[in-house]
Image (spheres, coloured by chain):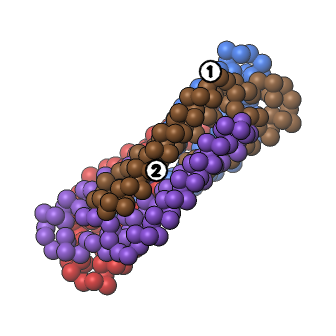
Chain colours: A red, B blue, C purple, D brown
């Protein structure tokens, strides 16, 4: 089950922005910036990443899932994957 | 309060690795990889980022804090910052 | 969509145990126990609660969802609920 | 390091309210209430618990810590405890 929807481009834009945040973080460390500013940048980057994950998961569940669900076995496999991801993302 | 300790280089290495993870993530999306693989990569990157934050916070509390704490007012300001950061990181 | 499965009893047992943990917490505070012991108890109780939530969600998705999913509109409503709950639980 | 401040009573009130939330949760399961309502109750209880933990930690750091910090060895032990609790609460 690959990414679906025509949101590919929007997705890449979000990832590019996160890459920019990480580069910003490195710059802050190189320039020996205040410790709490660095930590805020980390928290912000994590927040952006987490909401990207939520967006992908929602998009996936809404867009690609339908056919899977007609098949009982695939359905169970999907639920297992969803729960596994939930557990990883909520840590 | 800037970053302290001689761990600057180790810190930059960890940030570089995280940058690599984000680039890997973009590659996965570009190549239309399986949705759950993408989500696992996001969760792993978030985990690396979170533990980087914990590392910086610990390093900071251990290394730079001492003199601050002799001063009551600065002490309270520091605790407020710590609680603020922890609230951001635990979201 | 109510709880399904015959796991009602097991569920109540888990909730009873959590109630016991909260009562234990109160006792610790009444007895003026060490602050970090209290915080560990809070973290343990939260962990038990979180995994109870995951268990209920999984049970629900696996057991009750099938018929819902044949209906496109209900399907979307379900996904919205799942994402909403996940956002609440991962905070 | 026990709980300090005269906030003992307020603390117990908060714990009592959380106990009430858990009892409410059990009632909901007994009455076979809608699954997502149950999950919202779990998320709300977890939120109350988490912010109780934050409150206790902040109170502790502000109120009881000062003398500890004059002693280098105790200081390091304290920081270790704080980081350990952060890690537990942010899971």
Taking the spot 27% from the left edge, 72% from the top edge, the residue there is C64
User: In the image, D60: left or right of A23?
Assistant: right
Corner quadrant of residue C79: bottom left
Taking the spot 19% from the left edge, 71% from the top edge, the residue there is C69
Residue A70 location in percent, x, y?
21, 81
Quarter of the image with the N terminus of chain A in it:
bottom left
Residue B47 is at least partly visible in this image? no
Location of mark 2 (residue): D22
Q: Say which chain tag 1 marks.
A: B
Give the vertical position of C9 relative to A33 (above or below). below
Location of mark 1 (residue): B77
**Which mark's residue is nearer the viewer, 2 or 1?**
2
Which residue occupies the foreground of this view, A74 or B56? A74
Residue C43 location in percent, x, y?
59, 49
User: In the image, D67: left or right of C51?
Assistant: right
Corner quadrant of residue B76: top right
Q: Residues within 10 Å of mark 1 (few under 14, many from 20)?
A: few
In 3D space, how far apart are the residues under numbered discs 2 and 1 (Cα atoms)? 35 Å
User: In the image, B52: left or right of B25?
Assistant: right
Q: Say which chain tag 2 marks.
A: D
Taking the spot 86% from the left edge, 36% from the top edge, the residue there is D73
Residue A82 location in percent, x, y?
38, 67
The answer to whether marks 2 and 1 sit on the same chain is no
Q: Residues within 10 Å of mark 2 (few under 14, many from 20)?
A: many
Give the vertical position of A15 relative to B68 (above or below). below
Which residue occupies the foreground of this view, C57 or B39? C57
Taking the spot 31% from the left edge, 75% from the top edge, the residue there is C63
Residue D31 is at least partly visible in this image? yes
- Tag 1's secondary structure? helix
- Tag 2's secondary structure? helix
């Amino acid at each position: 089950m690959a990414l679906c929807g025509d949101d590919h481009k929007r997705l890449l834009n979000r990832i590019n922005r996160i890459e920019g945040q990480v580069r910003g973080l490195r710059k802050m460390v190189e320039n020996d910036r205040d410790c709490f500013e660095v930590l805020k940048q980390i928290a912000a980057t994590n927040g952006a990443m987490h909401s990207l994950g939520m967006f992908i998961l929602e998009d996936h569940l809404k867009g690609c899932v339908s056919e899977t669900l007609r098949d009982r076995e695939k359905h169970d496999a999907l639920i297992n994957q969803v729960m596994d991801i939930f557990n990883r993302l909520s840590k």
